[in-house]
Amino acid sequence: MISRGQAERTWRVKTKSPEQTMHLGRICGELLTQGSVIALMGDLGTGKTVFVKGVAKGVGVADEGEVTSPSFVLVNEYQGRFPVYHVDLYRLHNAEEVEDLGWEELICTPGVTLIEWAEKVLQLLPEERTEVHLEWVNAVERKLMFVGKGKVAHGLVQTLGEKWMKED
Ligand SMILES: Nc1ncnc2c1ncn2[C@@H]1O[C@H](COP(=O)(O)OP(=O)(O)OP(=O)(O)O)[C@@H](O)[C@H]1O
Ligand SMILES: [Mg+2]
């Protein structure tokens, strides 16, 4: 069900395999427009990186093997039909540290930015964003909740939900 709130739009879905999560990411990547920020939130091993791999594919990044969690450098850049910035904040100690990454530039840049462990910098995220909350169900299933915040993100969450239900 897609809820139609004033300020945000929410869509919940359960995936039954990593492949399905990747496919969902791919559809999302195909729909993305430049300037989008995707904030991924959820525990270790819930599938954030799997989802990002799918998104990269959907944006047209040729080599999916390139997509790995950038734990040490914090930001990876891939080239698709526009740049994809993949940020992983797992090792971040405090929000101030992201300033060293050139945070403003990162989230305002043309291209799309995907942020793993975005809950660590909640107050620094742009208002216009799509949140993906991931939850572990069992060895092969994950619950994903998409929250579109802002007009563009509303549209993305709406269309993603519709496309997914059509394919299912
Ligand atoms: N339905 C599913 N969707 C996504 N991943 C799944 C699913 N079922 C099982 N998995 C497995 O869960 C793991 C998810 O790993 P992934 O690296 O994407 O997690 P993560 O959220 O990025 O973790 P981290 O916080 O360590 O970066 C993979 O080993 C994947 O095969
Ligand atoms: Mg990861």
Image (cartoon, helix red, strand yellow):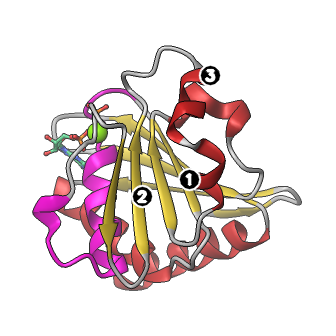
Q: CA distance from mark 3 to mark 1?
A: 15 Å
* Front residue (pair 82, 28): 82
Residue 96 shows which numbered tag? 3
In the image, is residue 78 above or below residue 104?
A: below
122 and 134: which one is in front?
122
* Badge 3 amino acid: Glu
Q: Mark 1 packing: few (<14 Cα in 10 Å), some, or many (20+)?
A: some
On the rendered structure, is 17 left or right of 25? left
Mark 1 and mark 2 lie on one chain; the one further toward the N terminus is 2
Category of crowding for the residue at label 3, using alpha-carbon neighbours closer than 10 angstroms: few (below 14), some (14–19), many (at least 20):
few
Give the residue number, with chain letter if any, for mark 1.
106
Quadrant of image for the N terminus: bottom right
Please say if the residues under marks 1 and 2 sit with CB atoms less than 8 Å apart: yes
Mark number displayed over residue 11: none
Membership of 56 in magenta stretch: yes
Q: Residue at x 43, y 79 (%)?
A: 82
Q: Is residue 125 left or right of residue 117?
A: right
Asked if the residue at label 1 sits under 8 Å from ligand 2, the reply is no
Which residue extends farthest left? Answer: 65
Quarter of the figure with residue 83: bottom left
Residue 59 x, y percent position in the rendering: 37, 78
